Image: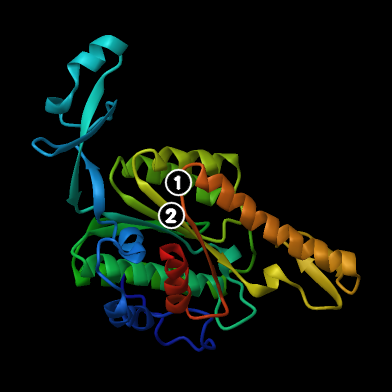
Amino acid sequence: MQKNKDNTAHTYPPGVVITLEEMMRFEYYVQDIPLLPQHPVYTILAGRHASKLRGRGLDFEEVRVYVPGDDIRNIDWRVTARTGVTHSKVFNEEKERPTFLVLDQSSTLFFGSQQLMKSVVAAQVAALSAFYTVRRGDRVGGIVFNEDRNEFIPAARSKSHVQYLLTCIAELNAELPLRKVIRPHTPTLNEILHRTATLVTHDYVVTVISDFSNIDEETIRYLEQMAAHNDVMLVHLTDPLEAQLPDGRLVLSDGIKQILWNNNTKDNGQRYTQDFDTMKASLTARCRNYRIPVIFIDTAAPVTDQIMHFFGKANN
């Protein structure tokens, strides 16, 4: 992380960039989130629940293929001999599980038609998750990235560590208004997920916060790989303008090419909205195959309200 950088003195309108001070306020918001282990918010954000622990003297749960890092004392030699593949016994215990945040701050997130830029909403989600995790006594770390660089923050469980994490986020977020060119086709997310997969061996809660504008089959493979031994969740940032365009003749761009779009015609308007709805349904269904929940957070409503609403529905 670069030293002595401070974006608190910016002159941008509210919602364009986020400051460290603004993110630190989320420490107080998490006081209202339940800490009950059975509560869905607790399960996902904090990462502590009945987990598959490689231990002894606990409740036996299952036998599965050996994973590097397993206690060799838990190898099931009879199953190993019968199958020819090393297997470990898995036991259940409630224990800490570190949270690993993968936070996208690339140029495609520097967009918002309502109150906030998607990049600011992404930073708010990360701050909320970090403070909630540490409040519960668990460790939090992650990777914050854009097209040009990334910051890796090892997991720890102190308030000062959260402040360091949020300082990294504030730095990369402050760079967004200075970018001259949007590069939507850079393979940044996949590169970061590849690196993340080497860091989160097992028993992590991995929260990927992005607009997933470049998601492809390689992205899904990395998510599937991590979900095999970790809890993975996607926070998909959206904007109301992506769901429905206003009437009129509009110029649309992906940062490289532009097209003239006539949204006055009924077919065009419906097709645009249907494409967005199809994308959401397809991603949700695809991730459900790997037990990866997807939360869609938009730029129009407060992040805290949206998260509590989502988990309220999940708990019904």
Rendering quarter of residue 24: bottom left
Asked if residue 120 can be seen in this view, the reply is yes
Percent x, y for residue 202? 29, 41
Please tell me whether residue 64 is drawn above or below residue 255 in the rendered image: above
Q: According to the image, label 2 marks what residue? A: 233
Residue type of the residue flagged with mark 1? Arg
For label 1, the residue is 291
Q: Of residues 58 and 45, which is closer to you in this image? A: 58
Residues at marks 2 and 1, CA–CA distance in whole angstroms: 9 Å
- Seen as rendered, the residue at the extreme right is 265
Up-down relation of residue 19 to residue 272 (above or below):
below
| x, y percent for residue 265 | 91, 70
Task: Point out which mark residue 176 bears.
Answer: none
Point out the tag, 2 or 1, that comes first from the N-terminus: 2
Q: Which of 312 and 249 is in front in this view?
A: 312
The image's colour scheme reads: rainbow
Residue 264: % across, % down: 89, 74
Q: Which residue is drawn at 48% across and 74% down?
A: 306
Tell me where residue 271 sits by quadrant.
bottom right
Asked if residue 2 can be seen in this view, the reply is no
